[in-house]
């Protein structure tokens, strides 16, 4: 058995926070040393933990990360919807502490990331690229962080400039589709935990890669696995592909 890892969860009363607390309670290699939600002071418990797992809000993450860097605590960050400036504030701390930053912690979605790159490389520029995601009606950011990672992978595999290529939905007389576009479409409704489909379409055929999450436990268990992994790493910025050894 591995040594016990002491975790602190920020955003502990949220949908993901509650899933993390429940999954950690079933893992004898983990102890929940602190549960922090809006209004609580992380400073009062941070020294009791080895690693902070943050599923609070993109607004809160930079401040939480700065405190972790000050106290030398490893981090697992699951929040999405970061601005470029917010993301820089987080990633600039990579010389001080080990950080796993991932838009999605599920093993299945990380397999989808890998397959998406492979499919884009094999199918080549004749195939039009579109990404469709659906989430529950309470989700605050759009598109999802996972969908953003998928279009980043597609742009990288096709050597396209993402900012110029991205088309968020389409409305009105937008003209014919160009070969360099990557379409992105966000659906919202009900209690959908997270669906993502990458479509590769050309004349005469279409490939669709789909992942559907039906429980938040898949994200929670992935984040807990990342927490046990990150406490053993040197300062740096890592993602779930590093944790799963997919690189
Ligand atoms: P949620 O709204 O249910 O929960 C967020 C919680 O954070 C709330 O309880 C809120 O009170 C708390 N919070 C807000 N500000 C805080 C602060 N300053 N300090 C401490 N707590 C604070 O949201 P959710 O569905 O649990 O999602 C949380 C985040 O995780 C979102 O950014 C979401 O997109 C992301 N997410 C990531 C993954 C992944 O695998 N990476 C999976 C699911 C959700």
Image (tube, rainbow, N blue to C red):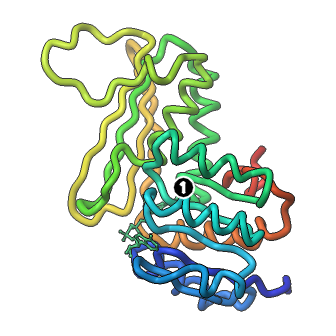
Residue 244 vertical placement versus 217 (above, below): above
Mark 1 and ligand 1: say if the CB distance to the nearest ligand atom is below 8 Å.
yes
- Left or right: residue 234 versus residue 172 is right
Quarter of the image where one finds residue 70? bottom right
Number of numbered discs visible in the structure rendering: 1
Residue sitting at x 46%, y 23%: 163
Above or below: residue 132 compared with residue 220: above
Q: Is residue 81 visible?
A: yes
Q: Residue furthest left?
A: 172
Instruction: Mark 1: give few (<14), some (14-19) or many (20+) Cα within 10 Å.
Output: many
x, y (%) of residue 100?
68, 58
Label 1: which residue?
104
Question: Residue at left 40%, top 24%?
Answer: 166
State left or right for residue 214 relative to residue 10. Answer: left
Figure quadrant of residue 223 = bottom right
Quarter of the N terminus within the rendering: bottom right
Q: Nearer the viewer, residue 191 or 45?
A: 45
Looking at the image, can residue 226 be seen?
no
What is the x, y in percent for residue 39? 41, 80
Front position in the image: 42 or 56: 42
Q: Is residue 142 left or right of residue 244?
A: left
Task: Point out the image quarter for the C terminus.
Answer: top right
Q: Position of residue 41 (x, y in %)?
A: 52, 81
Disc 1, SS: loop
Residue at (47% x, 17% y) in the render: 127
- Residue at 77% x, 60% y: name it: 97
Ligand 1 - quadrant of the structure image: bottom left
Horizontal relation, residue 140 to residue 209: left or right = left
Is residue 116 placed above or below 220 in the rendered structure? above
Q: List x then y, in percent, for residue 185.
A: 31, 36
């Amino acid at each position: 058995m591995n040594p016990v890892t002491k975790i602190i969860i920020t955003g502990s009363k949220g949908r993901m926070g509650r899933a993390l607390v429940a999954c950690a309670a079933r893992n004898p290699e983990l102890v929940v040393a602190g549960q922090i939600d809006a209004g609580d002071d992380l400073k009062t418990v941070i020294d009791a933990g080895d690693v902070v797992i943050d599923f609070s809000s993109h607004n809160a993450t930079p401040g939480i990360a700065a405190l972790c860097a000050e106290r030398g605590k490893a981090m697992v960050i699951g929040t999405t919807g970061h601005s470029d400036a917010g993301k820089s504030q987080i990633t600039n701390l990579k010389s001080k502490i080990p950080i796993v930053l991932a838009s999605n912690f599920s093993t299945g979605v990380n397999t989808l990331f890998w397959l998406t790159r492979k499919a884009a490389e094999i199918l080549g520029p004749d195939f039009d690229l579109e990404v469709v995601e659906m989430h529950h009606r309470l989700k605050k950011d759009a598109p999802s962080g996972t969908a953003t990672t998928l279009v980043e992978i597609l742009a990288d595999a096709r050597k396209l400039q993402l900012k110029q290529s991205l088309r968020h939905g389409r409305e009105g007389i937008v003209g014919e589709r160009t070969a360099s576009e990557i379409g992105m479409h966000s659906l919202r409704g009900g209690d959908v935990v997270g669906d993502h489909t990458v479509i590769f379409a050309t004349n005469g055929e279409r490939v669709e890669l789909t992942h559907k999450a039906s429980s938040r436990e898949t994200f929670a268990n992935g984040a807990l696995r990342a927490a046990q992994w990150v406490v053993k790493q040197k300062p740096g910025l890592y993602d779930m592909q590093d944790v799963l050894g997919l690189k």
